[in-house]
Image (tube, rainbow, N blue to C red):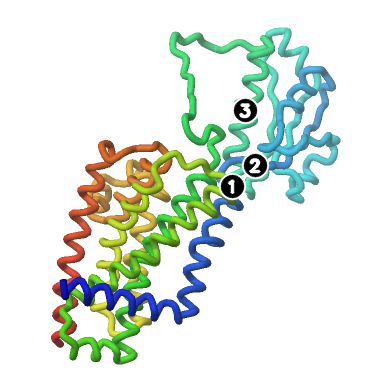
Amino acid sequence: MRTLSHIWRLGLKELTSLRYDSVLLLFLAYAFTVAIYMPAAGSVIGVHNASVAVVDEDQSLLSRQLAQALQPPEFQTPMALPYAELDKVMDSGRYTFVINVPANFQADLLAGREPALQLNVDATAMSQAFMGAGYIGRIFQQLLTYSGQAQASEQTPIRLTTRALFNTNLEGGWFLAVIQIVNNITILAIILTGTALLREREHGTLDHLLVLPLTALEIMLAKIWSNMLVVVLCTWASLEIIVKFALGVPLAGSMLLFLLVTALYLFASTALGIFLATLARSTPQFGLLSIPVIIPMLLLSGGSTPLDSMPQWLQWVMQGSPSTHFVSLSAAILFRDAGVGVVWPDLLALAAIGLSFFAIALGRFRKSLAS
């Protein structure tokens, strides 16, 4: 009971010191508001509002239907363009796509010949150009097939029908918003606990704690629960205000389960932050030491790049990172409404990694206090 009282009071001390640290409070506010909203709302992975011009040398009903098939929000309303200005507008970058419909295109198609369309692409708009060319090809093919003016080259007995249960319009910003929260949780879990420990060492308050009847376990648990509380509350507020209200993302899963999983992940990540702080002599050293740890956790956890696309040995290595299991749990709970009966393997792995990190960090912390 006395140990719990020590942990409680030391945690309150951590919260009080955070309350008067205006820089960290400002960083917390930024990390869970602006840093979530701007990438999710402004970063469009697919084709959106791409500029299109059409050089219509055929002047037929079919050529007009092809131009009208390119609709917002993927494409802007196609603009008519004289043939003589085609090279000029492409060189100036005025349009991302310029479609040239040759003369007698409809007549040649009805006669059974295979006329060709010319699609000019401004490749400097790399992502739009790559995916937009595929979009235009599929839209034109569907239009021609539906109108009966083109037949499939071969008949197949299998037809693939795709239905999206969640995120039916495949909005990339929905997934990006949740991944930004996951990344910010990782950064803050390590930074907050590490800087809290180093700040006490640099200010001399850690020496004051050593003369009190406190153990290394009590000091460490106090730092973990206080920082865990702050990050969990910020996560909940960000999901409710930024993700669900401002961005309009309909999260399907249990918020309570996700917050409990977040607390478990923070247990592992904050222990890692304390371990790194015991290796560093100062706050700048801790910042440099955190970079080669945080960046692989963010880039190789499965949030930015699927694990299946990585080498097999790297997939096995990343199973030892808590961020890998947290990304998997976040997607399963929030997007697919998975329960404990589905995600328990990742929960068990995350708990085992957290206990391992905690034991290692506690041993290192005791040594640093003794020295």
The percent position of residue 123, horizontal first and vertical second, equals 63, 45
The percent position of residue 174, horizontal first and vertical second, equals 52, 45
- Check disc 2: other Cα within 10 Å, few if <14, some if 14-19, many if 20+: some
Where does label 3 land, which residue?
137
Front residue (pair 293, 110): 293
- Check disc 3: other Cα within 10 Å, few if <14, some if 14-19, many if 20+: few
Where does label 2 land, which residue?
48
| Count of numbered labels shown in the rendering | 3
- Compared with residue 31, is residue 84 higher up or lower down, i.e. above or below? above
Q: Quadrant of residue 5?
A: bottom left
13 vs 156, left or right, is left
Where does label 1 land, which residue?
44
- Cα distance, mark 2 to mark 3? 16 Å
- Residue extending furthest front? 1
Q: Please, what is the three-letter code of the amino acid marked with disc 2? A: His
Q: First in sequence: mark 2 or mark 3?
A: 2
Front residue (pair 3, 350): 3
Residue placed at 40% from the left, 49% from the top? 303
Residue placed at 35% from the left, 66% from the top? 189
Q: Please, what is the three-letter code of the amino acid marked with disc 3? A: Gly
| SS at badge 3 | helix
| SS at badge 2 | loop
Q: Quadrant of residue 371?
A: bottom left
The answer to whether one can see residue 275 in this image is: no
**Labels 1 and 2 touching (C-beta < 8 A):** yes
Residue 241 badge: none
* Quadrant in which the N terminus appears: bottom left
The percent position of residue 204, horizontal first and vertical second, equals 29, 92
Residue placed at 59% from the left, 32% from the top? 134
Front residue (pair 64, 17): 17
